[in-house]
Amino acid sequence: MGREGKPEGYYFPPQLNATSGIFPHTYFGLEPGTKKEDIRRCLEKWDEGDNGILDFSKAYRLKPGTGWLVPPRILHAPGSLLTYEPQWGSDVLSMFQSMVDGRRVERSLLLQDVPEDRHHDFDFLVDLVDWPTNTDPNFKSAHYLEPIPVSDSESDGYIDKWIVYGRIAGEQRFSAKELTVLPGASCTIRDPGAYGLIVTQGHGTIGKLDIDCPSAIRFGQMTQDEVFVAYDAAVEGVRFVNESRTDPLVTLRYFGPDVHSDMPAVGDHAC
């Protein structure tokens, strides 16, 4: 429909998931063999309560320290783990589930990006879904992400891992890494592009800035857990110092499109 799709990457930081919540599972895609008529009937029953679309999907257990890569037009229903979610800068969506956790979903969320003359064209709505990808019997192997070490650096006092990676329709839209600096250690990290950074554990410094992962935040309070690193600084190299003798310093770095030509492909973790 000429709109920007919204590919998403998920990562479940272990430090921020001490509890798994009420439903640490996500529904992805559709069961192989699901027919368009099945989903059409679900959409036709929108105002009758639960339209039953989850009967045609599969729930995958979410595991802290892992993630998923979700292209546009993939049906998905996020679970209760806290999620670090790099994504493309778009809010285009179409909600196919009429009730979530016992609460009604307004039909306007199904139609917000659909032309008005198509609001009751159920065949058109069903075709918003990428059918081959949603019904892929090997869906997990094509979208599930395990961390991949960037290099063998633990003996140098730090561990850098790919956590969100892989191309979408042949394009590198975004990527993310998790850096762990061991207690009392330091390292200099170079990246070929600017990035945003979030601290998930520990305290120390990044360049000249103090960083710290807060244990509690009151409304309106300033924190030291978010940093933006500009291109020149990233390329030159940024020094990370862990000032704790006991606690690892853990940060997540998010990169925009086409920054890392050496980014792994989905499934490389299985090698």
Image (spheres, rainbow, N blue to C red):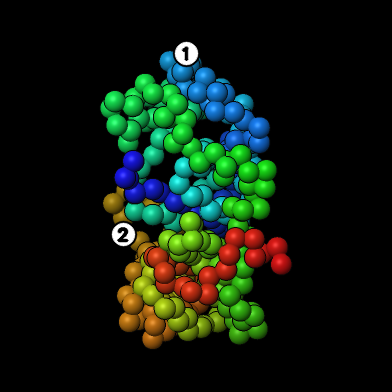
10 Å crowding of disc 1: few (<14), some (14-19), many (20+): few
10 Å crowding of disc 2: few (<14), some (14-19), many (20+): few
State the residue at coordinates (71%, 67%).
271
Q: From where the camera sits, is residue 110 visible?
A: yes
- Give percent across and percent down for residue 213: 45, 63
> Mark 1 and mark 2 in contact (Cβ < 8 Å)?
no
Instruction: Please tell me in which quadrant of the rendered image residue 246 appears.
Output: bottom right
Q: How many marks?
A: 2
State the residue at coordinates (61%, 72%).
149
Judged from the image, the secondary structure of the residue bearing numbered disc 1 is helix
Q: Is residue 36 above or below residue 164?
A: above
Q: From where the camera sits, is residue 212 visible?
A: no
Quarter of the image with the N terminus in it: top left
- Give percent across and percent down for residue 15: 56, 57
The amino acid sitting under disc 2 is: Met
Judged from the image, the secondary structure of the residue bearing numbered disc 2 is loop
- Residue placed under numbered mark 1 in the picture: 48
Q: Is residue 138 left or right of residue 11?
A: right
- Give percent across and percent down for residue 127: 46, 34
The amino acid sitting under disc 1 is: Glu
Q: Nearer the viewer, residue 14 or 194?
A: 194
Q: Is residue 270 above or below residue 34?
A: below
State the residue at coordinates (42%, 30%).
125
Q: Is residue 220 left or right of residue 30?
A: left
Instruction: Please tell me in which quadrant of the rendered image residue 205 appears.
Output: bottom left
- Residue placed under numbered mark 2 in the picture: 222
